[in-house]
Image (spheres, rainbow, N blue to C red):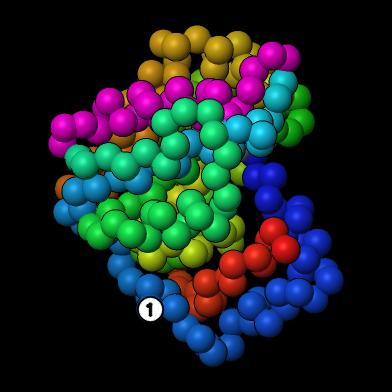
């Protein structure tokens, strides 16, 4: 669940970040026109929310808890082939800006942020968010792999190009994965089982390995670059 978006939009409305929204080319990011990663050996896994921020909370299922569980399973799937950095390994709150900053400390790496979704009761299935050209193929691979193991998709947005702080600011390719809707009764029931969460982790790991082995190959034309400067600290949190 993208809790930070409404606040961000509120700040945009207040004019606090309007100068950051321009795409005139001023302040172009160095990674705006970069191809996707190939041969990377490090994966930064960001379990969404944590501590005082529970994320979505539906019928006893808490997003922060499920996200951490899937993140730990993903770590197990990726090791020892990859060096894995966990943004958090327990139930603690981490500021969004710190997550972006921390991820940027690693070279030859990608950032994968794990979330669970919240929406209409009829909506189910995975959604994967990216913003930058260098993150497109990884996002597409994750979305395809998750779609292959998640039954009964309905009304979800699929692969989404959206500027979030975690899809724009890190210096490494970065995506945000919504592993399913807690608000859909059937999907929530599946997500409550460890076997299903393991399947999700396996699917995300397959996508990450494919991206490292193949780079952008096979994922079709890359989207046009969008030059937008990283947001300043405090853009979305005042
Ligand atoms: Zn979330």
- Quarter of the image holding residue 104? bottom left
Q: Which residues are magenta?
A: 59-81
Question: Which quarter of the image is occupied by the N terminus?
Answer: top right
Viewed as shown, does residue 128 lie left or right of 35? Answer: right
Q: Where is 115 relative to 201, above or below?
A: below
For the point 33% across and 59% down, which residue is it?
105
Residue that lies at the very extreme toward the right in this rendered image: 14
For the point 58% across and 29% down, which residue is it?
64
Task: Provide residue 186's location: percent of width, then percent of height.
Answer: 63, 14
For the point 25% across and 60% down, which residue is it?
107
Q: Where is 179 relative to 195, above or below?
A: below
Label 1 CB less than 8 angstroms from ligand 1? no
Viewed as shown, does residue 88 lie left or right of 235? Answer: left
Task: Provide residue 162's location: percent of width, then percent of height.
Answer: 59, 58
**What is the magenta segment's predominant secondary structure?**
helix
How packed is label 1: few (under 14 Cα within 10 Å), some, or many (20 or more)? few
Residue placed most toward the observer, 44 or 22: 44
Viewed as shown, does residue 185 lie left or right of 46? Answer: right
Residue placed most toward the observer, 106 or 207: 106
Q: Is residue 78 magenta?
A: yes
Q: Is residue 185 magenta?
A: no
Residue placed most toward the observer, 216 or 37: 37
For the point 65% across and 45% down, which residue is it?
2
Task: Provide residue 81's location: percent of width, then percent of height.
Answer: 15, 36
- Quarter of the image holding residue 200? top left
Question: Which quarter of the image is occupied by the C terminus?
Answer: bottom right
The residue singled out by tag 1 in the image is 30
């Amino acid at each position: 669940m993208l809790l930070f978006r409404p606040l961000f939009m509120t700040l945009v409305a207040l004019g606090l970040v309007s100068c950051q929204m321009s795409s005139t080319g001023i302040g172009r990011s160095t990674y705006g026109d970069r191809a996707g990663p190939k041969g990377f050996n490090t994966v930064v896994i960001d379990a969404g929310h944590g501590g005082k921020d529970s994320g979505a909370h539906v019928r006893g299922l808490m997003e922060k808890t499920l996200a951490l569980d899937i993140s730990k399973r993903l770590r197990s799937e990726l090791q020892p082939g990859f060096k894995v950095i966990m943004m958090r390994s327990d139930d603690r709150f981490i500021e969004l800006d710190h997550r972006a900053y921390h991820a940027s400390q690693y070279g030859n790496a990608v950032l994968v942020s794990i979330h669970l979704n919240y929406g209409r009761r009829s909506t189910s299935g995975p959604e994967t968010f990216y913003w930058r050209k260098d993150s497109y193929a990884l996002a597409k691979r994750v979305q395809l792999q998750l779609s292959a193991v998640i039954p009964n998709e309905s009304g979800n947005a699929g692969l989404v190009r959206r500027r979030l702080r975690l899809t724009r600011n890190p210096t490494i390719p970065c995506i945000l994965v919504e592993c399913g809707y807690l608000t859909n009764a059937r999907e929530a029931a599946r997500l409550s089982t460890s076997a299903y969460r393991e399947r999700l982790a396996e699917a995300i790991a397959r996508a990450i390995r494919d991206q490292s082995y193949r780079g952008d190959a096979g994922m079709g034309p890359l989207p046009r670059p969008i030059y937008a400067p990283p947001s300043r600290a405090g853009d979305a949190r005042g």
